[in-house]
Image: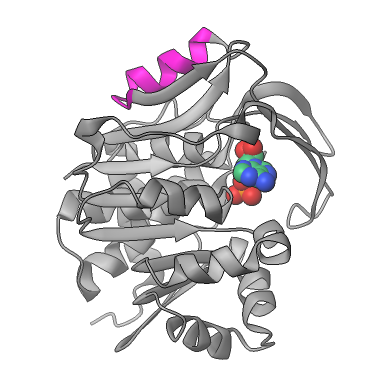
């Protein structure tokens, strides 16, 4: 089953203690769409300016991403820049320029409106609600958010929670949104705000998945070389939603497997800047890493 993804499409400038790359392909929807494309066909909704490089458009096409919902507007593409410390868990945002996103109010192409699975990648909750309002009877809706919206758009964010099936967010965001120091309490409190499932990401420490009768704790895939953690969360969420869309049904088993699929794709993504690593992986690489993930975390050995 296909997956509709909306979110930011960006030109990112990223600095780590060892490298710096300018105006590379980024944005929550870009990472999510390429990550999901390994599992299911993707309908992308977003906007870029007329400065957006053609090779980046070709990357989506190469991954079979449907671009009928991508608007190319006169103006500049959304830009974001960030800098990592030696401890790459710490990142500072240096600048954000919404540019063409400032006035973006998409009308979905008619053939997008029946898409059964939806992933609202990180963008303003108002825009997430606007896109969602145009979809007819979706089967399962996943949404991501960030601290910025908790701080400046909490009311629409809480309204969004009532309309979605699964919320994905970082541990600090979960604590901040629910005003809880305990992640377990924050997860349970979020379930009471609307979504049936909540997935709390803990960066290199994995993630926790909460549901009414479900609690699943998954590690992250341990890596020796991390070059750029940008977009890991977006890849996780895109692959998670993509895996569920491919399965076509949501139950405890598919949700657990979707978490591992998300962790596998996110682990590839951090091995290089932008989408450079995801560009090179093949289904057999995904299968091999999924298998070693299982071996690594299985403890009930006969
Ligand atoms: P992450 O590493 O998961 O936080 O995602 C990083 C990506 O989010 C980058 O590629 C940015 O272009 C994008 N991004 C940063 N700030 C925002 C924002 N305010 N709204 C939407 N996307 C953003």
Residue 226 in the figure: left or right of residue 30: right
How many numbered dots are placed on residues in this image?
0
Residue 234 in the figure: left or right of residue 254: right
93 or 102: nearer the viewer: 102
151 or 272: nearer the viewer: 151
Tell me the colour scheme of the image.
Answer: one colour
User: Which residues make up the magenta segment?
Assistant: 54-67
- 5 lies above or below 78: below
The image quadrant that residue 179 belongs to is bottom right
Residue 64: in magenta span: yes
Give the image location of residue 98, x and y in percent: 69, 34
Q: Residue at x 32, y 87 (%)?
A: 212
Give the image location of residue 147, x and y in percent: 69, 62
211 or 277: nearer the viewer: 211
Q: Residue at x 28, y 67 (%)?
A: 255
The C terminus - image quarter: bottom left
184 or 166: nearer the viewer: 166
- 234 lies above or below 150: above
Residue 181: in magenta span: no
Residue 230 visible, this angle:
no
């Amino acid at each position: 089953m296909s997956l509709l993804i909306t979110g930011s499409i960006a030109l990112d400038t990223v600095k780590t203690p060892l490298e710096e790359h300018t105006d590379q392909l980024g944005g929550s929807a870009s990472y999510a769409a390429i990550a999901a494309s390994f599992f299911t066909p993707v309908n992308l909704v977003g906007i870029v300016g007329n400065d957006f490089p053609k090779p980046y458009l070709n990357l989506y096409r190469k991954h079979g991403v449907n671009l009928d919902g991508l608007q190319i507007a006169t103006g500049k593409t959304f830009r974001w820049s960030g800098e990592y410390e030696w401890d790459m868990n710490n990142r500072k945002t240096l600048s954000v320029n919404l540019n063409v996103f400032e006035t973006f109010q998409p009308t979905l192409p008619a053939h997008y409106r029946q898409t059964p699975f939806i992933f609202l990648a990180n963008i303003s909750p108002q825009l997430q609600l606007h896109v969602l309002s145009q979809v007819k009877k979706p089967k399962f809706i996943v949404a991501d958010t960030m601290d910025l919206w908790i701080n400046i758009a909490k009311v629409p964010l809480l309204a969004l929670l009532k309309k979605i099936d699964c919320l994905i967010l970082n541990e600090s965001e979960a604590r901040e949104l629910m005003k809880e120091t305990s992640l377990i309490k924050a997860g349970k409190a979020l379930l009471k705000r609307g979504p049936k499932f909540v997935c709390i990401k803990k960066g290199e420490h994995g993630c926790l998945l909460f549901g009414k009768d479900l609690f699943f704790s998954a590690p992250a895939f341990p890596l020796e070389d991390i070059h750029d953690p940008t977009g890991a969360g977006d890849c996780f969420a895109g692959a998670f939603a993509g895996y569920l869309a491919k399965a076509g049904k949501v139950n405890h088993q598919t949700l657990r497997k979707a978490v591992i699929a998300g962790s596998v794709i996110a682990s590839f993504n951090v091995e290089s800047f932008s989408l450079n690593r995801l560009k090179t992986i093949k289904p057999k690489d995904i299968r091999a890493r999924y298998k070693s993930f299982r071996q690594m975390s299985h403890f009930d050995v006969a």
